[in-house]
Amino acid sequence: MRIIFITGNKHKMEEAAAILHDHDVERLDIDLPEIQSLDPEEIITQKLAVARERLKTDNDVRDTIIMVEDVSFWIGDTGLPGPLIKFFNQTIGRPGLVTFAHAFGTDKARALCCIGILRPGVDTPEFFTGTIEGTVVPPRGESGFGFDPVFIPDGHTKTYAEMLGDEKNAISHRKRALEALEAFLETG
Amino acid sequence: MRIIFITGNKHKMEEAAAILHDHDVERLDIDLPEIQSLDPEEIITQKLAVARERLKTDNDVRDTIIMVEDVSFWIGDTGLPGPLIKFFNQTIGRPGLVTFAHAFGTDKARALCCIGILRPGVDTPEFFTGTIEGTVVPPRGESGFGFDPVFIPDGHTKTYAEMLGDEKNAISHRKRALEALEAFLETG
């Protein structure tokens, strides 16, 4: 099956192509508006609707799955920042994520990747989620982006940013979501 | 001039009608998507574009100003929560706003109302802003909504929520933005 993965990020594309290796995954870098919400599925649903509308004049798209992902980061039971993590990074930054967690009496966090797809002829999105629990620590490590330097997955001692790319990709929230999608496509 | 104020909130409508008393202000309660951003003008620009598109079949709209407002709340120099205040209210709540401020070493905050209008025949929005500086305190008072119970404007001793409606409206960030708009319309 042909899958159009809408993302500006080449690394995400490579990771998706590696796990969805039985499929023809193409990257499309178009800017889709993101609505304000704490619900990843709501954000993705709206992005997929806009993407389908923009791609509808593409003949090939009738046999194509459209795919979008959203990463959220949940600190303790605060309910924040979730999909708004990018705005926390832009403002209070990584040390601020730690300050935030401690202020609310926690050092726990959950990284979540939600993938939504629209299959040809199917009106409503289908979702695949991967989560990984962990701990928030002061920033360590150079690689990675977003919350990677302040997040240690449970059962590990390195932050995401201290892991080599393969090491992170082998355990990540994104890998788990992609595997859930892959399993669905194999049986579907 | 006829002004269509797009809001779900009747109180905001009454306040606008009172200050813009030389104009014919009508309330239109339609749901406009809000994009993720920390920039009120960016959020409003996109809402106005959608509103103009939806209203374009309305003959009268050709002689009508379309108006949208966005309230943001800025704690210290954190750069947060800004227009994302509603999500802070929904999750960590009002006591959480105080916890957040103290964690980042401040008790200062700024309430900002940004009004955007599209005038007939004008392609780009025009903006009118009202701000009020103040202090964040543990919640006090029953009236008001959003951050009202935790915000004391500078020069006052009551929170917004402890003030009677008229008392708040006489000094509020929203009143200042409406007055800036009124002054513009009078001279324009």
Image (cartoon, coloured by chain):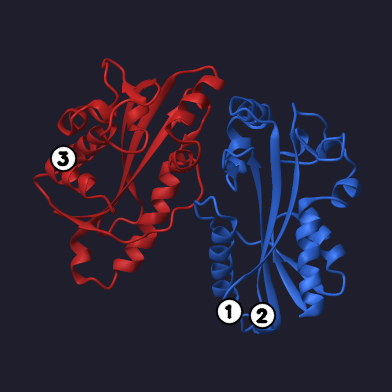
Chain colours: A red, B blue
Determine if residue A77 is in view.
no
Residue B109: which quarter of the image? top right
* Chain under disc 3: A
Q: Which mark is residue A179?
A: none
State the residue at coordinates (39%, 21%): A137
Secondary element at image label 2: helix
Q: Nearer the viewer, residue A109 or A37?
A: A109
Q: Residue at x 14, y 44 (%)?
A: A20
Tell me whether circle 2 and circle 1 mark residues in contact (CB < 8 Å): yes
| Local secondary structure at mark 3 | helix
Name the mark on residue A187. 3
Chain identity of mark 1:
B
In three-dimensional space, the C-alpha distance between marks 1 and 3, rounded to whole angstroms, equals 47 Å
Image quarter of residue A65: bottom left
Mark 1 Cα shell of 10 Å, populated few (<14), some (14-19), many (≥20): few
Residue indicated by mark 2:
B61
N-terminal of the pair, mark 2 or mark 1, is 1
Q: Could you say where residue B148 lies in the image, as x and y percent from the top left?
A: 76, 39
Residue at 30 percent across and 24 percent down: it is A159
Q: Position of residue B147 (x, y in %)?
A: 71, 39
**What is the CA distance from the residue labelled 2 to the residue labelled 1?**
7 Å
Nearer-the-camera pick, B40 or B107: B107
- The residue to which callout 1 is attached is B56
- Looking at the rendered structure, the kind of residue marked 1 is Lys
**Relative side of B145 to B22, left or right:** left
Q: Quadrant of the N terminus of chain A?
A: bottom left
Residue type at mark 2: give it: Val
Q: Is residue A62 above or below residue A23?
A: below
